[in-house]
Image (cartoon, helix red, strand yellow):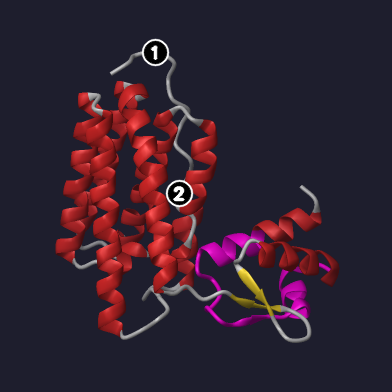
């Protein structure tokens, strides 16, 4: 990987994980010193990230970290309803028994973490939840759908979602995951699509509630950047699905 690609990947991962404060300014010289590179690859990476909407042009040099507002939450989750709903319907037809078992095990891991007192329980929930939703795309057997859908799971308002949930919200989310798994086991595409739509529509309502309670137009999550980054970096892609052993 070239220096330019490494700088771009590092900055993109940091932006996706909430490493930088929304609205803060990234200065070329500061980023270059931080990454021990020249300004040239930093400048190129910033231009690419501006084009992707993760940064905004700043006066003179550098860029501003794009803040996330209420409409961004609506947009991301409505897109997820469309893509994950379709993915779940395909997974209901294509998933192997092992894949469905793995999704169920991930949901059980979330449920156990919800009831635990361990300090890293929210990070455990995040990682298992990300693996669950990524696993749905894997089971769909649609590489193009997975490519586009997984990108929506990278956004900080998605990876940080559980930090605005109370315990009842988490328990309900686990129940909804169980319904998704049941739909996959039944091989029912319509049920799987509807279960995902219900699950993500409920998430939208929780974000709306959080926005009203906080009186904010932008969303921030009460989590240290180091933990958010760890949640992103520790979430490894699921293993390749087996060729046989259908449901």
Q: Are marks 2 and 1 in contact (CB under 8 Å)?
A: no
| Up/down of 27 relative to 90, above or below | below
Residue 19 colored in magenta in the image: yes
The residue located at (72%, 80%) in the rendering is: 27
Location of residue 74 in the rendering, given as x and y in whole percent from the top left corner:
38, 64
Q: CA distance from mark 2 to mark 1?
A: 26 Å
As for residue 31 lying within the magenta part, the answer is yes
Q: Quadrant of residue 44?
A: bottom right
Q: Secondary structure at mark 2?
A: loop
**Dot 1, how many residues are within 10 Å of its Cα: few (below 14), some (14-19), or many (20+)?**
few
Residue located beneath label 1 in the image? 244
* Dot in front, 2 or 1: 1
| Position of 71 relative to 62 (above/below) | above
Mark yes or no: residue 5 visible.
yes
Residue 41 as seen in the image, left or right of residue 174:
right
Residue 53 position by quadrant = bottom right
Nearer to me, 206 or 12: 206
Quarter location, residue 162: bottom left
Q: Quadrant of the C terminus?
A: top left
Residue under numbered circle 2? 235
Q: Which residues are magenta?
A: 10-38
Q: Nearer the viewer, residue 143 or 122?
A: 143
Mark 1: which secondary structure?
A: loop
């Amino acid at each position: 990987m070239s220096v330019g690609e490494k700088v771009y990947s590092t900055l993109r991962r940091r932006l996706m994980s909430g490493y930088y404060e929304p609205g803060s300014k990234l200065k070329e010289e500061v980023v270059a010193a931080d990454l021990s590179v020249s300004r040239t690859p930093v400048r190129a990476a910033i231009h690419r990230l501006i084009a992707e909407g993760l940064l905004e042009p700043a006066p003179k040099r550098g860029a501003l970290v794009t803040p996330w507002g209420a409409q961004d939450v609506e947009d991301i989750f409505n897109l997820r309803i469309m893509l994950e709903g379709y993915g779940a319907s395909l997974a209901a037809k294509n998933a192997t028994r092992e894949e469905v078992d793995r999704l169920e095990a991930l949901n059980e891991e979330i449920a156990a973490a919800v009831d635990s007192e361990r300090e890293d329980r929210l990070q455990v929930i995040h990682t298992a939840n990300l693996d669950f939703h990524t696993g749905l795309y894997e089971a769909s057997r649609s590489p193009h759908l997975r490519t586009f859908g997984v990108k929506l799971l990278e956004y900080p308002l998605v990876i940080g979602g559980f930090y605005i949930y109370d315990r009842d919200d988490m328990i309900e989310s686990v129940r909804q995951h169980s319904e998704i798994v049941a739909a996959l086991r039944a091989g029912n595409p319509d049920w799987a699509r509807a279960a995902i739509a219900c699950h993500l529509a409920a998430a939208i309502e929780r974000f709306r509630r959080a926005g009203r309670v906080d009186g904010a137009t932008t969303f921030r999550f009460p989590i240290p950047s180091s933990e958010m980054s760890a949640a992103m970096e520790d979430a490894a892609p699921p293993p390749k699905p087996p060729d046989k052993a259908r449901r």
